[in-house]
Image (cartoon, coloured by chain):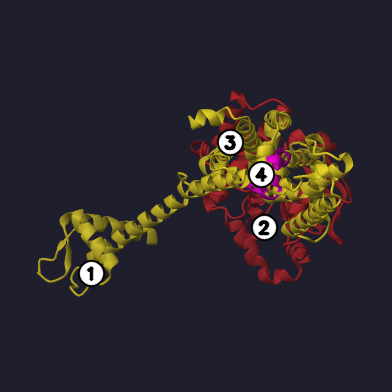
Amino acid sequence: MATSDLTDTALSIKNLTVSYHNQPVLWDIDLDIPAGVMAGIVGPNGAGKSTLIKSLLGLVPSLSGEVMVHGRPYATQRKRVGYVPQRSSVDWDFPTTALDVVTMGLYGRLGWLKRPGRKERHEAQEALEMVGMSALAERQISQLSGGQQQRVFLARALVQQADVYFLDEPMAGVDATTERAIIDILRRLRDAGKTLIVVHHDLQTVRTYFDWLLLLNVRVIASGKAEEVFKIDHLRQAYGGQIALLNDNESLMFAASKVK
Amino acid sequence: MVWLELLSDYTFQNVVIGASLLGLISGPLGCFAVLRRQSLLGDAISHAALPGICLSFIITGSRDIGGIIIGSLITGSAAALIMLMLTRLSRLKTDAALGACLSIFFAVGIVLLTYIQSTNNASQGGLEAFLFGQAAATLRSDLWVMGSITLVTLLLLAVFWKQAKLVTFDAEYARTLGMPITVIEASLTAMVALAVVVGLQMVGVILMAAMIVAPAAAARQWSRHLGGMLTIAAGVGIVSGVSGATISTLSRGLATGPLIVLTATVIVLISLALAPGRGLLWGVIKHYRQKSALQKQQLLYALYKHTADPSCTPSTLGSRRMLNKLKQQGYLTRSPRGDDGWGLTAQGQEEARRVVAAFEELAS
């Protein structure tokens, strides 16, 4: 790992609580994620993984809590934060091209009135190049496969040149090639000193992909370096009864380290 | 010289200009409504305009367009707002909230309308024309108001194009970029209300929703970009407005508003069927092409694999037609045994080998 400077904190959350109707979805989350890591957020269904990311970004109202990005409140640091939402969150039948979607990542920087010009299109094209999609720049987004759509979303975040990236299940429903490609890009970003915070659902690959982990089930079960968090006790605590599915502790660990 | 006479006719001019303005604003605004899955919001807003029209008449005592526009904007926006609050705060789903809002506001409107009629106010004549529109009653002064609203709305869209587009495609992402999405979404909804107001005089509150949805639905079929979609939708709106108005005038007495809506519907149907790439017709053709290609491969495969078996004679009409087609293409020949069987030609052998190879590669 090129950068594991644990003194700089990329994301710091204090006392974050989110509720839906009367039900707490996230309860008293305290969390510090160091800069330059690839952090996975893992937990059972309904643990609040996506809600955590969305409440950090102000997309879901929170009851309490403060979010600092690189030491300053999130609201003042928007330009340093990139977001890759779940692919299913938008209607892909929208009449536009892959390149145009990526250009949307620059709208924040352009301000209220300025329009994207040649420079912006060039940057967007470069971001598409990074995710291996430059040949499909002019393709209608409705004609892209699921994996290609996910790459377009990734490119849209890349073009923002942020320091901290939030990704909501980027590996959900994509083919193996795309998963490989996405992981490669994320690793490259991490090696360039960026911080990546990824909601992930596949326990099999957790150990190979992430160097930092948050195990979540409404509360923080454990957080820290991946090898310290990914332990059967913690997993049992997070997944409760569902752990029966992965009772064979040793084989799980073994399988995970084999994937490489 | 019917046309010359028609073009110099004052009423006809007003109706055509009014219909064009309506198309010009409802097409582009409808695109945003349709893409944001809020096409029925236009329906709720337009039905809810009726109580506003009646209230404005009760207060001002006249059919002045200014009062009517303000009244219908207020009740229309109130309906939209209540609908959004119902979906957000209660457990009602969008469709139920929308249906409730639409019918309650419309019922209030009808009650007010009959109340006004019962007061026998001499100037109330024709207030019910707002139900289905009364294009022929359009005045030059109305056109100026409609034109200004259209111009301002389109200018606003042009200036905040980026914001409108991103909020429509991906509102949450827009918010992470720091865009005030609530303001932008509310503005887009308010603009739909403005489009409805422009159409009140022409097509009336009941059919107005069609002018929001139809041009946008037709335009989506032909466009690859949002900008193109808006332009085409405006064009469809104008064409249906003008042709509806013309048909109505030439036919003497057929209602203009419904004719405009019907023309738009015809354009939608044509677009749904024929638009390149997205049209149903191309879907059907593609399906048959693929099916026939598959049948050809399957037949060649079968003949190649089971050459020795003379008992496989074609039994269905479809496969017999396909066999004859393959014979014409030079892949097949009548079997040399002289019976009813078929054999592969050298060319057919080659093609069949390719099919088999592709098939086995797929299976492995």
The reply to the same-chain question for discs 2 and 3 is no
Badge 4 crowding class, 10 Å Cα cut-off, few under 14, some 14 to 19, many 20 or more, is many
Residue B97 or A214: which is nearer the viewer? B97
Q: CA distance from mark 3 to mark 1?
A: 63 Å
Q: Nearer the viewer, mark 2 or mark 4?
A: 4
Badge 2 crowding class, 10 Å Cα cut-off, few under 14, some 14 to 19, many 20 or more, is some
Regarding mark 2 in the picture, which secondary structure is present there?
A: loop
Name the amino acid, label 1.
His
Above or below residue B45? Residue B308 is below
Q: CA distance from mark 3 to mark 4?
A: 14 Å
The answer to whether marks 3 and 1 mark residues whose Cβ atoms lie closer than 8 Å is no
Q: Colour of chain A?
A: red
The answer to whether marks 2 and 4 mark residues whose Cβ atoms lie closer than 8 Å is no
The residue identified by callout 4 is B203
Q: In which quadrant is the N terminus of chain A drawn? A: top right
Residue B343 showing in the rendered view: yes
